Amino acid sequence: MKKVFTIILIINLFIVSLTFADSDKMLNETNNHTYKRIDQSLNWNEAKKYCESVGGYLANVTTKEENDFIFYSLLNNDNKLYWLGGTDEKVEGSWEWITGEDWTYTNWNTGEPNNLRDEDSLHFYGNKNAWNDMRMHINANFICEWSTGVTISSCVQMNESPVTDATAMLMQSGEIFQKVPIDENGCYIFYNVDEDKDFTIVIRRKAN
Ligand SMILES: [Ca+2]
Ligand SMILES: [Ca+2]
Ligand SMILES: [Ca+2]
């Protein structure tokens, strides 16, 4: 009886290790950004948070070169789906990258985006060099990206709660460089901050 149990355990361990076979962190020499394929099945918001927790962001694909690097160097020609950092959650049909980079290059599959039953987040097909919009709560694997800039992630403590009506602003020479909402936990994230420049972070809360 003990022998049988041992064999089953080994088989189970083998399956688990196959499921979590993330790629290596790969450097794209044309933009000096690094990327990693994460083979964990998470919904879009969880995948976004995962990348941020390791100092990066859900990949933003702004050129054909970057798109093809991800498809040919990181994806496995499998039938899985891979989240990218694009969304039209705020305004239906108005797609944007989570880093605020310009939404100009696209690689939609034929007939996409079709917003079928309210699809607001972007994924790559593992076996087709094309994108599709999919509902945010569906679980998929994903691609994290790291740029040469630093990502600043922080949470603010305010006396009163909630803090969801607040905005964090990255200011330089009196001008706003990035503006991001503060989430339900009081946290904000600035992407691709140039660490050689002085900057100030201003938390602004809407007046009641
Ligand atoms: Ca990118
Ligand atoms: Ca949509
Ligand atoms: Ca779709």
Image: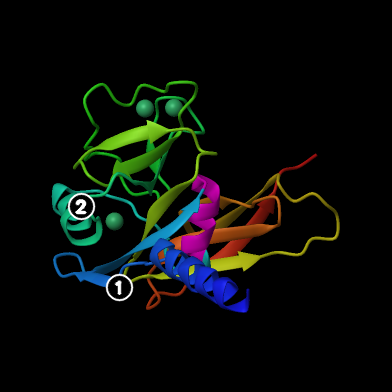
- Magenta-drawn stretch contains 44: yes
- Magenta-drawn stretch contains 14: no
Q: Quadrant of residue 177?
A: bottom left
Query: In this orientation, which residue lies closer to the viewer: 127 or 180?
Result: 127
Q: Please tell me which residue is depicted at 42% across the width and 33% down the height of the picture.
A: 134
Extent of the magenta region: 43-52
Q: Main secondary structure of the magenta part?
A: helix
Q: Callout 2, which amino acid?
A: Phe
Does the image show residue 171?
no
Q: Quadrant of the N terminus?
A: bottom right
Q: CA distance from mark 1 to mark 2?
A: 14 Å
Q: Quadrant of residue 38?
A: bottom left
Residue 118, x across and y down, in percent? 49, 24
Q: Are marks 1 and 2 in contact (CB under 8 Å)?
A: no
The residue that mark 1 highlights is 24
Residue 107, x across and y down, in percent? 21, 37
Query: In this orientation, which residue lies closer to the viewer: 9 or 112?
Result: 9
Q: Please tell me which residue is depicted at 23% across the width and 31% down the height of the picture.
A: 109
Q: Please tell me which residue is depicted at 36% across the width and 70% down the height of the picture.
A: 149
The residue that mark 2 highlights is 71
Q: Callout 1, which amino acid?
A: Asp
SS of the residue under disc 2:
helix
